[in-house]
Image (spheres, grey):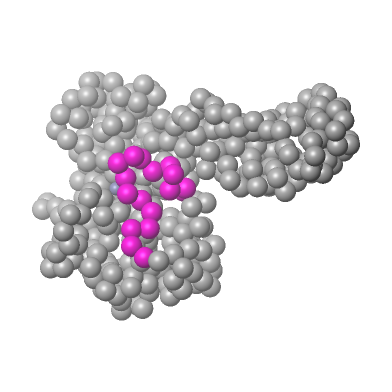
Amino acid sequence: MKTLDIINFLETVAPSSLQESYDNAGLIYGAPETECTGVLVCLDVTEAVIDEAIRMKFNLVIAHHPLVFKGLKKLNPDRGISQVLVKAIKNDISVYAIHTNLDNVITGVNNKIADKLGLADRKILVGKEGLLKKLVCYVPVAHLDPLQQALFTAGAGQIGQYSECSFAVKGEGTFKAGDGADPFVGAVGKRHMEEEMRLEVMFSSWQQKKVLAAMREAHPYEEIAFDIINLENLHNEVGSGLTGVLQEPLTPDTFFGLVKERFSAPVIRFSPLTGKKIQKIAVCGGAGSFLISNAIAAGVDLFLTADLKYHDFFEADGRIVLADMGHFESEQFTQDLLFDLLKQKFPNFAVLKTGVATNPVNYFL
Ligand SMILES: [Zn+2]
């Protein structure tokens, strides 16, 4: 199996086009065509992780956090990030990151946190605009079914929990085939009128290539009349943060105890309590302060995240409880998520979670 096969699979899990503009997710070092000897999954790529990959004779490291995040102007083989990178390069170890794109899908980082807390009724906290498109395609009546089927198979027609969503209406299409054309119906040089269906179907922007290829494959015409329309609708399954509901309302003490236990979090920092029990919550793995106002607007009792600064806690303002469980603690199970996905897809391939504890933060209690 090639490195590319694994990357292509991860692209179906969380397309790299869904990463934030400041991010650097994707293949950071390596040749996609390389034969892959094994995958080591981690949250952070440290030198110890690369050493582990060398020991295991694995040549692909998949991390949540990109090893190279900001621009690197010089490579110093003895220090910091470049030391890790140089070691990976010298040992032909590819390094891939699946970062904010995995944060942004409903099945990603935050879903794993929600699993650990047993949250029901999960929804994206802030959906993303500009990711939905509509395909309008005109097809002879008898070819509607196979075209619809092909588009659905390519992933179009998904709205929330509903699949195979489309709309079709009958009408009359006209065309006149010119010299050199080979019309499916009608004759060259004569205007033809055909009973056609106007088929409308929605798809996610990253599926466009696949959806159009499916359309071309299933459509009988050599020239297909179709429109691609950008929609302003929010994507329900892509965006930042996630809201959900605990099985039962808990006192803050009980909730914090639950978080400490499930996430092995030594410390939870939190803003003044509101006097309410905790049931509806928002979660965001890693640095989530950019979502405080959205969490308040969503009407949740508590927002569980990490990397909150002193002044962030003031923003709670009696309307919500803000809680910080630590960056590593919040995202540690992303390793399990990636491991499980890879193992499910490639059951007989060598995939391991790192045995290295990469959390750079220590606690003196
Ligand atoms: Zn993170």
From the viewer's perspective, tell me whether residue 183 is left or right of residue 71.
right
Asked whether 301 or 57 is in front, the reply is 57
Magenta part of the chain:
14-30
Name the residue nearer the viewer: 143 or 304: 143
Q: Picture quarter containing residue 186?
A: top right
Residue 203: percent from left, percent from top: 59, 37
Q: In the rendered view, would you say 287 is above or below 31? A: above
Residue at position x 42%, y 35% in the image: 239
User: x%, y% of residue 207?
Assistant: 57, 44
Above-or-below relation of 111 to 318: below
Q: Residue at x 23, y 68 (%)?
A: 86
Does 146 sit left or right of 227 as displayed? right
Q: Nearer the viewer, residue 102 or 182?
A: 182
Q: Is residue 101 magenta?
A: no
In x, y percent, where is residue 344? 53, 62
Expressed as whole percent of the image width and height from the top left, the position of residue 81 reads: 20, 60
Q: Nearer the viewer, residue 184 or 24?
A: 184
Query: In this view, which residue lies farthest toward the front?
Result: 179
| Quadrant of the rendered image containing residue 138 | top right
Taking the spot 36% from the left edge, 65% from the top edge, the residue there is: 30
- Residue drawn where x is 28% and y is 69% of the image: 88
Q: Is residue 245 visible?
A: no
- Which quadrant of the view contains residue 80? bottom left
Q: Is residue 234 left or right of residue 117?
A: right
- Can residue 136 be spotted in the picture? yes
